[in-house]
Amino acid sequence: MTTSIDKTSDYLSTEELRKLNRYFQNQKNYSMALLIEFGFRTLLRFSDLERFKWEDILDMDELTLNEKKTNKRRAIKVGGVLKDIISKTYELMGSPSLDCEVFDYTLRHTNRLLQIGAKEIGIRKKNISTHSLRKSGARFIWEEFNKSDESLIKLSMVLNHSSSAITRRYLGITKEEIADIYEGFNFKL
């Protein structure tokens, strides 16, 4: 039995994310460019991202929220890079009122914009959605920590998965990647 997380959306490489971000920057759609950064770096679902107002994120060192899907309280440290991106985007957007929503598109419209942007930059065979940002961030962390079991366990907790097996499927860890571990035995005793 397959779960809905198997193929609902694909993850993007950091290079694909950079290109997609640049595409929206060039289109002067700074909200979408920020969404890419924010979704990737916070690992939040769109249902949580869409609730943020500028006053919730501008100049903040930590974001605190109750996740909409799980209703679990979550605190997220805002790194210096993301904090700087938020500040610059706020200025580029003309310093909107602090009580305005940061991401004011619907889920459907946002997904459509991501798909159009992906097509424009040459990403053709991937299913792109807002969830791709969360998956891409999780995949990035897993790879940065050398694809370790420890990183899988921590990601399971951050993503609120019930097991690391679900996180493995979520990250799209392929049979080829699992088979690659046997390459380490390519020596004689």
Image (cartoon, helix red, strand yellow):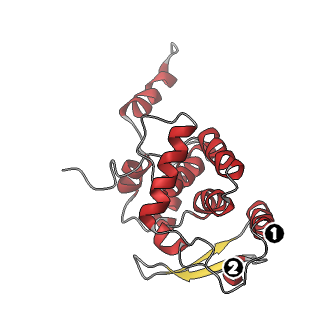
Instruction: Pinpoint residue 81: horizontal percent, then vertical percent.
Output: 78, 60
| Disc ID at residue 54 | 2
- Residue depicted at 36% across the width and 53% down the height: 165
Which residue, as the protein is rendered here, is positioned at the far bottom?
99
Instruction: Pinpoint residue 52: horizontal percent, then vertical percent.
Output: 60, 78
Q: Is residue 162 left or right of residue 135?
A: left
Q: Nearer the viewer, mark 1 or mark 2?
A: 1
| Disc ID at residue 117 | none
Which residue, as the protein is rendered here, is positioned at the far top?
188
Marks 1 and 2 sit apart, C-alpha to C-alpha, by 11 Å
Front residue of 187/166: it is 166
On the image, numbered disc 1 is attached to which residue?
A: 91
Marks 1 and 2 in Cβ contact (< 8 Å) = no
State how many labels appear.
2
Q: Amino acid at mark 2?
A: Trp
- Residue depicted at 72% across the width and 84% down the height: 98
Label 2 neighbour load within 10 Å: few <14, some 14-19, many 20+: some
- For marks 1 and 2 on the same chain, the one whose residue lies earlier in the sequence: 2
Front residue of 150/23: it is 23
Q: Is residue 90 left or right of residue 165?
A: right
Label 1 neighbour load within 10 Å: few <14, some 14-19, many 20+: few
Front residue of 169/16: it is 16
- Residue depicted at 71% across the width and 69% down the height: 78
Can residue 135 be seen by looking at this rendering? no
Instruction: Pinpoint residue 27: horizontal percent, then vertical percent.
Output: 67, 51
Q: Secondary structure at mark 1?
A: helix
Q: Amino acid at mark 1?
A: Glu
Above or below residue 70? Residue 19 is above
Instruction: Pinpoint residue 10: horizontal percent, then vertical percent.
Output: 43, 46
Q: Secondary structure at mark 2?
A: helix
